[in-house]
Amino acid sequence: MDKRTQKRLIPTVALFLALTGASVCLPAYAAQQDPFEPVNRVVFKFNDFLDTWLLRPTAVVYHALLPSFAENGVRNFVGNLGEIRNTVHNGLQGKAGAALQSAERLLINSTVGIGGLFDVASKLGIPVQREDLGQTLGVWGFNSGAYLVLPLVGPSSVRDGLGVVVDPLLSPLLQLSINNGPRIGITVLAGVQTRADLLAAESLLMGDAYSQYRQVYLSKRDYDVQDGILDGDAFLDQGEDFSSDDGTFVDEDF
């Protein structure tokens, strides 16, 4: 796997870890944030079982059958669904410029980009400004709290878990007058695409899956909350890049 591909895949490893529990070694402080480790490990094993027998096989077939342009369209469409969330949370964090950029991306990609199938905004130099409720609460001074592994959802924390409930309310999928069938179908398609994108990253993951998964998630969330301004983070100090090829964060949620 070439360096360009690795850089593109690394930002979405967090979601893959939610399903497989794999990750890379990070600071030991993460263990101190996991008072529910026995229960978390049980949930982790369930997620890993689900990935092994359902999610990964589905992603392999999906990736083999779909041409690359079709997968790009799915990625762009899913990313566009998250622009409302990005606009709201950038605004709540007082980032007026970023909120405006997110709104511009939503307008441009939803119209010129044909419903978000094409990322025209990035071509025009308008980068993704990804934010969520957990990041907003972190900026407001709320500690992440205990680390949690949620069924199906995967890595989270007491603070970030609130976003699992609240942020989907900002998705156009819930606002549009459509039947549950198409809504569920789009959600499943987005999950399969994310899993397919991470097939090539599996070789990067090794060691104690649970511990590595926990460490990379907590470190990345600190990175997200502080907009990449961190001191002494072992993972980031090793030169890992959470950005996509155009320098923007991959949008894993929608």
Image (cartoon, rainbow, N blue to C red):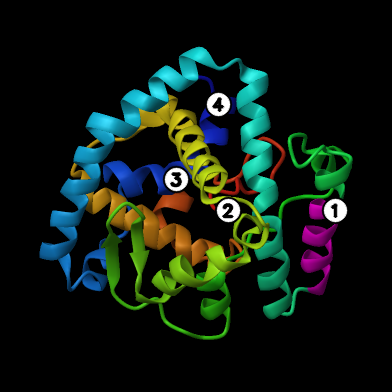
Mark closer to the chain start, 2 or 1: 1
Query: Left of 85 or right of it: where is 149?
Result: left
Q: CA distance from mark 3 to mark 4?
A: 18 Å
Mark closer to the chain start, 3 or 4: 4
Instruction: Residue 234 in the image: state x and y as whole percent.
Output: 39, 54
Residue to which mark 4 is pinned:
5
Q: Amino acid at mark 3?
A: Gln
Relative to residue 75, is residue 148 depicted above or below? Answer: below
Q: Secondary structure at mark 2?
A: loop
- In this rendering, the label closer to the viewer, 1 or 4: 1
Mark closer to the chain start, 3 or 2: 3
Residue to which mark 3 is pinned:
238
Q: Are marks 3 and 1 in contact (CB under 8 Å)?
A: no
Query: Which residue sits furthest front?
Result: 179
Q: Residue at x 22, y 65 (%)?
A: 31
- In this rendering, the label closer to the viewer, 4 or 2: 2
Q: Looking at the rendered structure, which numbered label has been put on residue 254? A: 2
Q: For the magenta stretch, what is the residue range? A: 96-106
Q: Is residue 205 magenta?
A: no
Query: Left of 128 or right of it: where is 234?
Result: left
Residue to which mark 1 is pinned:
107
Q: Amino acid at mark 1?
A: Leu
Q: Secondary structure at mark 1?
A: helix
Residue 99 visible in the picture? yes
Q: CA distance from mark 4 to mark 2?
A: 23 Å
Q: Are marks 3 and 4 in contact (CB under 8 Å)?
A: no
Magenta part, dominant SS:
helix
